[in-house]
Amino acid sequence: MIHIEAVVEDDGTLRACKASGHAGAGKAGSDIVCAAVSVLIRTAFKTLSGRKGITLNGGAPEKGQMWLETGYEAEGKEFLSAVGVFLLEGLSSIAQEFPNNCKLTIKNLSGFC
């Protein structure tokens, strides 16, 4: 099972996303659920990377683990919000379609303070 935890602000702005585990929906190297999650998170990271007004950290320290953390200045918030909505919609769709292989939890940043 892939466990995905996303952290958003009150207005939905993405602040972090971490995925860990293996879906087990297919053979290693050809698992459609793992591939979909990986592509969405990597694409979000690459889309945000180097964007003015957005700070970004992240990585994939080993197979089955990916994470990203975001920060922003006023000029980058709208773009970050749009990319975050796209990422979370995609991840939510995967979790709904493959509930035995992928679980998405979205937490509010204010709950961590």
Image (spheres, rainbow, N blue to C red):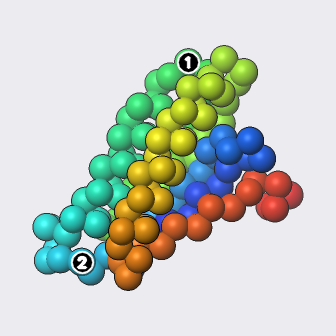
Q: Is residue 106 above or below residue 9?
A: below
Residue 58 coordinates in the image, percent (x, y)? 49, 48
Residue 83 coordinates in the image, percent (x, y)? 50, 36
Please name the residue that numbered disc 2 is placed on: 25
Tell me the CA gap for discs 2 and 1.
Answer: 38 Å
- Quarter of the image that includes the C terminus: bottom right
The residue under label 1 is which amino acid type? Lys
Towards the viewer: 41 or 86: 86
Q: Residue at x 51, y 51 (%)?
A: 88
Q: Earlier in the sequence, mark 2 or mark 1?
A: 2
Please name the residue that numbered disc 1 is placed on: 52
Q: Are marks 2 and 1 in contact (CB under 8 Å)?
A: no
**Dot 1: what SS?**
loop
* Quarter-of-image position of residue 112: bottom right
Towards the viewer: 57 or 17: 17
Q: Is residue 8 left or right of residue 28?
A: right
Q: Is residue 83 above or below residue 28?
A: above
**Dot 2: what SS?**
loop
